[in-house]
Amino acid sequence: MAFPCLDALETRSATLEARSLSTGPEPAYTTGATEVFRCTKPLLLDWGGVLPEFDIAYETWGKMNADKSNVILLHTGLSASSHAHSTESNPQPGWWEKFIGPGGCLDTDKYFVICTNVLGGCFGSTGPSGIDPADGQRYATRFPILTLEDMVRAQFRLLDGLGVDKLYASVGSSMGGMQSLAAGALFPSRVGRVVSISGCARSHPYSIAMRHTQRQVLMMDPNWNRGFYYGKVPPHAGMKLAREIATVTYRSGPEWEQRFGRRRADSSKPPALCPDFLIETYLDHAGEKFCLTYDPNSLLYVSKAMDLFDLGRETQSAASARRAKRAEQIESGASPARPEASCSLTLPDSPYLEQPDAKIVDTTTTPIEVASRPPMT
């Protein structure tokens, strides 16, 4: 039996290995020209890590008014860059092209729209593919664990640099909707309005499980090399499969039925083990396209930040305590340049074990009290 899908994978891998670019086989994750804000003030992170300095790539549309009161901060989804709309320097259509512009939902005749690439991303902002100033080497998986709140605090450093005291609105969808909520919770006096589309105040266990599966598939690719693949062949097979899993979660059963049903790509041919149904070819294409346009380590870190998201009071209080403790360590002379090992992306030392006193809660009969809520500041 022929396996054209495996043949294509082997051909791509051979092509990557044969490359002799100055940057190595890893593609350059660029979407065009952006502005870059460099912050040299250390950023204390929720899980105890520290970034001694960082860059935030951003793009803008519209004109800021005299008192800077018409600014809208647009947050991205997991894999999007700051290129939400075409610009003069980058005429390629953005991921929200139809929503931004004169007379649009985000009316650039009225508002000044800012969109950033998230901290931890790979489109110009500091992330695991960036350079650690402590040793001049790529961070890779020495990069500290992030939260969405860390990303929002980095964005507000940018706003400080632009002299923006208060946003007209914080807007985002999906992960961006979560960031939008976080902006309102962390900086209530600096956010006039919050628009959260398909966002949530904390990640659901099902979502965590699905993103965990994606990360495991990626990390099991031998080319991932515990995150140190830069200058080598990237883990494209793992990335491709991870994206296919993710794509399944982005759509509903009725939509799959309506768009593809049980139709085959070529009904005149006998079934094959490679993609055969239209839905299989769609997923195959989605994974193939994504694995060449996004850094695998960024996928790991940003998706983990989504899992950790919880605006509940207990979670936020614990994060504040960790940041305060780290600040004390820095003030006492501890260097902020190197994150602690516990803050880095690592594999567990021991397998999951069921605890003897573990209790199963029957949610059909037992009410669950939810005491956590966004912090009052």
Image (cartoon, grey):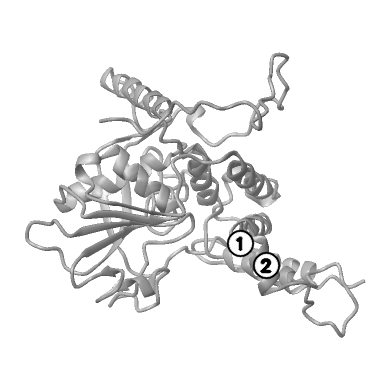
Q: Is residue 47 above or below residue 201?
A: above
Q: Is residue 169 left or right of residue 119?
A: left
Q: Quadrant of the C terminus?
A: top left
Residue 356, image x and y in percent?
73, 14
Q: Observer-nearest residue: 67 or 366? A: 366
Determine whether 369 is above or below 203 in the image: above
- Rendered image: mark on residue 149: none
Please, what is the three-letter code of the amino acid marked with disc 1? Arg
Residue shown at the point (8%, 56%) measured from the top left = 67
- Using the image as rendered, state which of residue 136 and residue 83 is in the foreground: 83
Where residue 254 sits in the image (x, y, percent)? 66, 65
Circle 1/circle 2 CB separation < 8 Å: yes
**Mark 2 falls on what kind of element?**
helix
Relative vertical location of residue 195 with respect to residue 134 in this rendering, above or below? below
Q: Residue furthest left?
A: 66
Q: Quadrant of the N terminus?
A: bottom right
Give the residue drawn at x 59%, y 41%: 208
* Quarter of the view holding residue 351: top right
Which class describes the residues within 10 Å of circle 1: few (<14), some (14-19), or many (20+)? Answer: few
* Extreme residue toward the bottom, this view: 268
Type of amino acid at the residue the image marks with label 2: Trp
The residue under label 1 is: 251
Number of numbered discs:
2
Q: Label 2 belongs to which residue?
A: 256
Instruction: Return the x and y of residue 41 as percentages of the image width and height.
Output: 24, 38
Q: Which residue is at 38% across, 73% downward?
A: 97
Residue 101: tell me if it is visible. Answer: yes
Q: Earlier in the sequence, mark 1 or mark 2?
A: 1
Q: Quadrant of residue 371?
A: top left
Q: At which x and y percent is residue 228?
A: 57, 46
Q: Secondary structure at mark 1?
A: loop
